Image: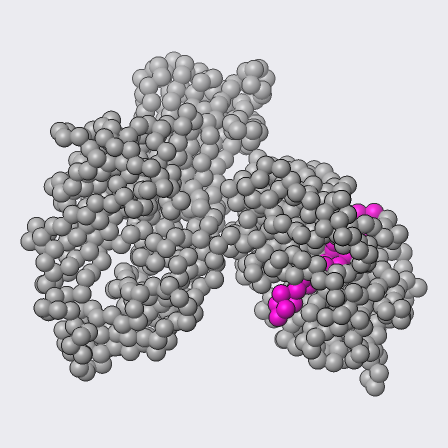
Amino acid sequence: MHKNSMTRPSPSGGGVRVLSRRSTGIGLILAVTLGISTIASPSPVEAASPPSKAAALAAVPADDYDPLEFGAWTLGNGGDPSGSGAQNWVELSGGAGYANADDTPSGAGSQLQQTVTGVTPGSTLSVTVYWNHGIPNPGDAMQLTLSYAGVNYAAWQTPYPAGSSKVVVANGAAIAPTTGSAERAATAYQVTLPDNVPAAGVVRFAMTAITNSVTPGDDFRISGLSMNSPPVPVPEEGLAESRAKKVVRSGSMKNPWGVTGRSPLFQDNLDVEVQAFGEDEATDTMYAGGNFTTVQRDSAGTDAETQEFLAAFDAVSGEWIPTFRPTLDGQVKSVEVLPGGRLAVGGEFSTADGAPHEGFVVLDKTTGRVHEDFTTLLVNRVSVETVSVWDTVIDDGWLYLAGKFTHASKPGTREVYSRNLIRLRLDDLTPDRDFTTELNGGAVDLDIKGNRLYAAGTFSTNKGAPAFRALAIDLTDRTQIPWKIHTSYGTAPLNTRQYGVVATDSSVWLTGAEHLIAAYDPAALTLKQTWIQAWGGDGQTIASNGDTVFAGCHCWGNTYEGSRNLGQTSSNFEQISAIGAYDAAAATIQRKPEVWDPVLSARRGDGAWASLIDSRGTLWTGGDFTHAQPHGWTSRRWTGGFVRFEQAGDATAPPVPTGLTAVTDGTWDALSWNPAGEDDLTYQVFRIGGSEMVAQTTDTTVTVPASPEGTRYLVRAVDAAGNASATGSPAAAEPGTIPPDRIPEGGETQPVQVISPRASWTYSFDAGIPQGWPTVETLESTGTAPLGWGTKDVVTKFPAAADGTRPLTSYYAKAFDLPADAPHKELVLTVRLDDGAAVYLNGKEILRENLPTGDLTDRTYATTSVAGYAAPDSTKTVRIPVADLAEGTNTITAEVHSNWTKAPSSTFDLEAVLR
């Protein structure tokens, strides 16, 4: 459980006074589709929502996002839209602002980017560039670069020699279009990534004006910007679990109760209403602490009751729990649920239940009374200030406390000196004298990942060793790990305090003054990425669900990625409303509104001071919030100090199947395994060393044609949301007898799915009829089905032009192999119809539906319109005798036609099964 606290400078040697905080050019029309493969096929970067049930029919992607869609860009020849000035300007439509591009090679230009994960060696990065020119200006030039993970893999320049037409240079070849407004496409560029390519990174397409000006009305367009990974053989260790990305819905949940009021302790924004959360999973209870005085139902004060500093709520319904009634005399900064019905509470109080308990107390988690077994005492021997505890965290049998104190004692034990950071044995809260620190300033926030403890605060040394505002300790030997952090504003104490720290699998994140968020490599603790929030935006709280990092602040403006110093901006920014979302793996800011775009109101703008992801994936954010916009609403609803954002969809992998056995009679291999323990599961069978699924079934048995001796099988479970378990222990087929009811009737082979729904297809979307169509083997772009637009299950999404139109026709191609000596009788194809489709086998037409007779062109309209909601069930089946297939490789090609250029949906998917 993770919380945060905030600090106020203190002149005394004990640290700082805390008051609360956390729990823890260019007229373009652009489409970007990024695809990543796991086992069987490339998977595009798609909507940040759980995969559909169809994901059970193919290897489940490791990570999915929606393709980026950008509106038209316009290009002027001056520093403003009027066309005057010394700079080119690039403006993104839709209110996204503009970025200047200097007339030098260092000009900022503009860039489009997308984060991808699951990239493997041999992945390909490709793009096609179009140039739509107006009247040439001699000496004009633009530079275009394509990069992944910070490495440029492609670069173009567009030089325009004096007295000549414009020239596009791509892939080393110059294309000289005629003058006028004709569009010419540059050669598509494709590069294979090296063996040392990182598994996660940012694909970026950048444009920079490098000489003179560019003609008004000129525009660039790019298509097919894609990242495709090759099929990967199943490794010896099997397949890891694969789940949907955890996505938190940015519309708020309803709070039937909230908190309000500010105690007389209130001095500034460090003393806001809600500053800490703690969850009791066993009883579905959420404890909220802070500086409030009252619980009530709404802004009108309905059913208001006095309850100061700490209250309990049902974590599911949000109802207040009136039987929990603690009595404290100061604000609460941290809450942690302990074993044995106990609740550890830290803060800036002096008494609990009227008795002295400075800064730290253990309560009965049901009643809120001081727990009868609590006797541990914290003291501060270097300051007259009250002891304060700002954060607590549990790990491996210990309770760690951070704040402002010097010693801890328990009756019957010797006092332990550990300044501002200490740990207590979890069972009886005895101080540990083997783990000690000597921080010369307050410890504000803690997190533990693996065997490392991380702390953030106002300190600069630990036991005399440098530890400027951040500390890392190896818990195996309790040694300090060197960590030199970046600060955004010199070294002044008030401008360098760090208020929040959280560790993920790939980065360690810090946030604090001045307006800084930073991600560090966990191995070397070196700086990876930074963000600077607009004026008024110090970081105050930070938490993560593993996929996304949520960083809160009193910020209500832009956050600039790559900026490192206070006041610095960048061309890559996003507007933040009190709490921003960042991709944990790629360390990039998440875009809005598709992913994270909450609408919040605060009493005076102090923003987010506490954050926690509970066991259901719900994000709890606390501060001085008064209203929040629910999902699907256009207005805001009273929320009372804290806001809840629920996780959208299931992102948990099912249990691993166990007990896999295989029996062979030389012709068939019969496999069986134990149920994985959840309903509505599909099971996928693989071979170690193979790159395709062998079979899938909703049963726990399957019979397949015998594999070579020694082949080892694996099985995994896939749930209705598309989350896949890891594979269980492998099994090789042992000689034996297969029961007759396990062998298909008539000796026919088990159906073999040669093309599965949600498979990878090559495609062409906006370049007219492909050369050689329909007898082609592959097309220039690759994506995962369903492909198209307009339905919820679309994986590879095609963009619209600025006027909302799309090409009428899209083209698809995919090859499959006919197994040698296969005893199947027919190939059964099931194709989605949305709107019209023609399908070809090795260039021969085998299906035409919802299309006119005669020759088909890329301007042929479908004869029928299919509604988007009906598209997944609008299918046509065709049966092809196996004798009509070629031995070895066969190719399926298909073309899909819309009923009109602004059709609300057009999608393609196809399944092919040998029976």
Using the rendered image of the protein, determine whether residue 477 is visible from the camera's viewpoint.
Answer: no
Q: Position of residue 277 (x, y in %)?
A: 69, 60
Q: Position of residue 626 (x, y in %)?
A: 72, 44
Is residue 47 left or right of 689 when viewed as pictured?
right
Task: Determine whether 639 is above or below 39 in the image.
Answer: above
Using the rendered image of the protein, determine whether residue 654 is visible from the camera's viewpoint.
Answer: yes
Q: Nearer the viewer, residue 742 or 137?
A: 742
Q: Position of residue 260 (x, y in %)?
A: 77, 50
Q: Quadrant of residue 753?
A: bottom left
Q: Residue furthest left?
A: 883
Q: Quadrant of residue 1?
A: bottom right
Q: Residue furthest front?
A: 303
Q: Nearer the viewer, residue 96 or 750?
A: 750
Q: Nearer the viewer, residue 708 or 254?
A: 254
Q: Residue furthest bottom?
A: 412
On whether residue 280 falls in the magenta region, the answer is: yes
Task: Determine whether 658 is above or below 506 in the image.
Answer: below
Image point (39%, 35%), residue name: 799
Q: Quadrant of residue 399?
A: bottom right
Magenta stretch, residue numbers: 268-292
Is residue 842 left or right of 544 when viewed as pictured?
left
Image point (86%, 48%), residue name: 267
On whether residue 637 falls in the magenta region, the answer is: no
Image point (88%, 65%), residue name: 350
Display coloring? one colour
Number of numbered discs on residues:
0
Q: Position of residue 726 (x, y in %)?
A: 40, 67
